Image (cartoon, grey):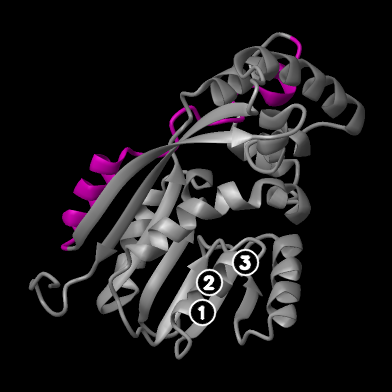
Amino acid sequence: MSREMAAARGPTVWDPAQYGVFGAERGRPFDELLARIPLRAPGHVVDLGCGSGEHTLKLARRWPDAAVEGFDASPEMIAAARQVASAAEASVRFTVQDVRRWRPARPVDVIVSNAVLHWIPGHEDLLARWVGDLAPAGCLAFQVPGNHAAPSHTLLRELCDSPRWRDRLGGLLDPGPVRDAAGYLALLADLGCAVDAWETTYVQVLGGDDAVLEWVKGTTLRPVLAALDPGSARDFLAEYGAALRAAYPPGPHGTLFPFRRIFVVARRPRSGGDPPP
């Protein structure tokens, strides 16, 4: 089944509570990405694919004088983000918007996209457009998972393509949806940006039973579960969970779950072809 066929079944429903089960582990890459953005006083900051909004509020805290906006295609995530902003009394605007169709009314100083682009086929064209939406010397900063060759993902694709599930799930998941750091550096440098690109593998120690299954329930499994009825989803989770327990057995300190991530901060030239400082 192609991603186009999967989309025809209906949109993926995101669960803010499930996504937040490992909030500290998911938040660390965003913090490290944010720390590498060199701008001191941007006027307009946008978070594309903002999810439940906690990270967007970090942008507002770092740049309290900036206009900060968050966009996400999931109404469930935006509803959660608005609650987070209200509880924090933060003046951040959250809007339901497919980031593929987002266009700013004016140039943006900082565009951030955290763990989003791997869901978007052909996102290289989107990155080029976002660079064009930056103000002179503005920054585009993004982070994507780079662990699609890890057992958590290879086992999932193998199960989706197995005889029992292939009619409903075959071909649903892209085996290589992102570039490596060097690939993104080349892409954005060709667009005239100064680029800082790097990769990190976090050796995450997860607690609880079926820890890796609980992790992927918040992200990678969402389109799979959306394509199955509740009874089939239970059967699928039982089969996949057994495979994950064998691949990631719990140890005395928890379950080790190595997770590779790819980071990029690209800065547009100040003017013409001059590179930013």
* Labels 3 & 2 near each other (Cβ < 8 A): yes
Q: Determine the residue positioned at 16% across, 72% down.
A: 269
Which residue occupies the foreground of this view, 174 or 202? 202
Q: Calculate the distance from the C-alpha at mark 1 to the C-alpha at mark 3.
A: 11 Å
273 relative to 174 in the view: left or right: left
- Can residue 221 be seen here? no
Q: Determine the residue positioned at 38% across, 79% down.
A: 108
Query: Nearer the N terminus, badge 1 or badge 3?
Result: 3
Q: Calculate the distance from the C-alpha at mark 2 to the C-alpha at mark 1.
A: 5 Å
Q: Position of residue 203 (x, y in %)?
A: 48, 33
Residue 162, placed above or below residue 78: above
Q: Residues within 10 Å of mark 1 (few under 14, many from 20)?
A: few
Say which mark, if any, is on residue 58: 2
Span colored in magenta: 164-192
Is 113 magenta? The answer is: no
Residue 219, placed above or below residue 133: above
Q: Which amino acid type corresponds to the residue marked 1 in the rendered image?
A: Arg
Q: How many marks can you see?
A: 3
- Give SS at disc 1: helix
Which residue occupies the foreground of this view, 209 or 227? 209
* Labels 2 & 1 near each other (Cβ < 8 A): yes
When asked about the image quadrant of residue 179, the answer is top left
Q: Which amino acid type corresponds to the residue marked 3 in the rendered image?
A: Glu
The residue under label 3 is 54
Q: Position of residue 160 (x, y in %)?
A: 66, 20
Task: Tell me the quarter of the image containing the C terminus.
Answer: bottom left
The residue under label 1 is 61
Task: Tell me the quarter of the image containing the N terminus.
Answer: top right
When asked about the image quadrant of residue 219, the answer is top right
Q: Position of residue 183 (x, y in %)?
A: 26, 41
- Give SS at disc 3: helix
When asked about the image quadrant of residue 256, the answer is top right
